[in-house]
Amino acid sequence: MLFAGSPEVAVPSLEALLAAGHEVAAVATKPDAFTGRGRVLTPSAVALAAADKGIPVLRPVRASEPEFIRAVRELGVEVAVVVAWGALVPDVLLGVPQYGWVNAHFSLLPAYRGAAPVQRALIDNQQETGVTTFRLVAEMDAGPVFRQLRTEIGDTENAGELLERLSQLAAGELVATLADIAAGVQPTPQPSSGITLAPKLTVADTGLDWSQPDYSVRGLIRGANPNPGAWTLFRGQRLKVLRATVVTDDHAPLAPGELAPSKHALLVGCGAGGALRLDAVQAVGKAVLTGADWARGTRVVAGECFE
């Protein structure tokens, strides 16, 4: 088997496959990258896990590199497994393993095809999601499905928390999928209806629009946490909003973006007369604070507004 993955959420799948007795001939992952304030050259989480287990690591900049294509062919593996690799498998390699490339995707396909299925589901205030294992084809996330597992989304889960939980579910589904393949089970084509897309979320996508309803603003806050982070401007400076709660109690009317600080809470007005309590915020270069503590330290005056 070839295992292709990069971030921490791919590690549970690699470990589960090894624990189930599958031989991993090599791992493909992103090249080492500079991280942290010290800009230290750091291997991916999957590369570290593979090195710890003595598994050879391939680090192509692009999967279409001739050297990588040759290396995959020379491995002679029966199947390749992909979990959050971050690279596109070229058409020329799709048929190289005998049983193809099996991908674990963090949505209930055909919903949320693309790079950010967990983030986009939270932004859309979905109440259910899941994991799908399927065979890769040339079209993005459109291949036939082996298995799907549904799960409810927790009321307070953010993208990082939900993705971590889904990564554990995906590990079990991949082990079961390989058993299915060994038993001769064939995947089922995806339906042609219900297709939605989940493009990568950028900082430009995550600026908060306080004129939107409270649940929509909170959905973006949840979906953008931890990366790239929802943000707003206050006195010309960017402020990340990490957690917020819809205010259900009676409160004084607030215009969209208007702030109402108190000893124990910071409320902000949203569209349609709603409001959010800001539970966790972070100014640039500063520690994470409760909204109330940030407002106190910043000397926010009632009636000031986010820009």
Image: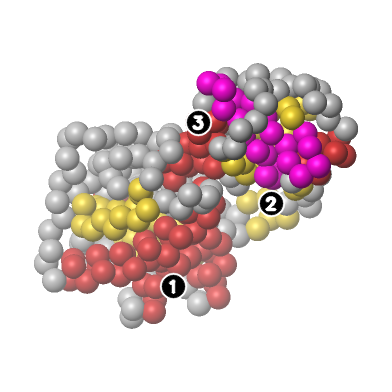
25 with respect to 56 (left or right): left
Q: Quadrant of the N terminus?
A: bottom left
Task: Identify the residue under disc 3.
Answer: 216
Q: Earlier in the sequence, mark 2 or mark 1?
A: 1
What colouring method underlies this structural image? secondary structure
Residue 207 location in percent, x, y? Answer: 61, 27
Q: Is mark 3 on a helix, strand or loop?
A: helix
Number of callouts: 3
Note whether 16 is above or below 104 in the view shown: below
Task: Identify the residue under disc 1.
Answer: 15
Q: In which quarter of the image is the C terminus?
A: top right
Identify the amino acid type marked 3.
Answer: Ser
Looking at the rendering, the stretch of residues picked out in magenta corresponds to 261-282
Q: Is disc 2 surrounded by few (<14), some (14 to 19) or many (20+) residues within 10 Å?
A: few
Identify the amino acid type marked 2.
Answer: Thr
Nearer to the camera, 75 or 261: 261
Q: What element carries label 2?
A: strand
Q: Earlier in the sequence, mark 2 or mark 3?
A: 2
Task: Identify the residue under disc 2.
Answer: 35
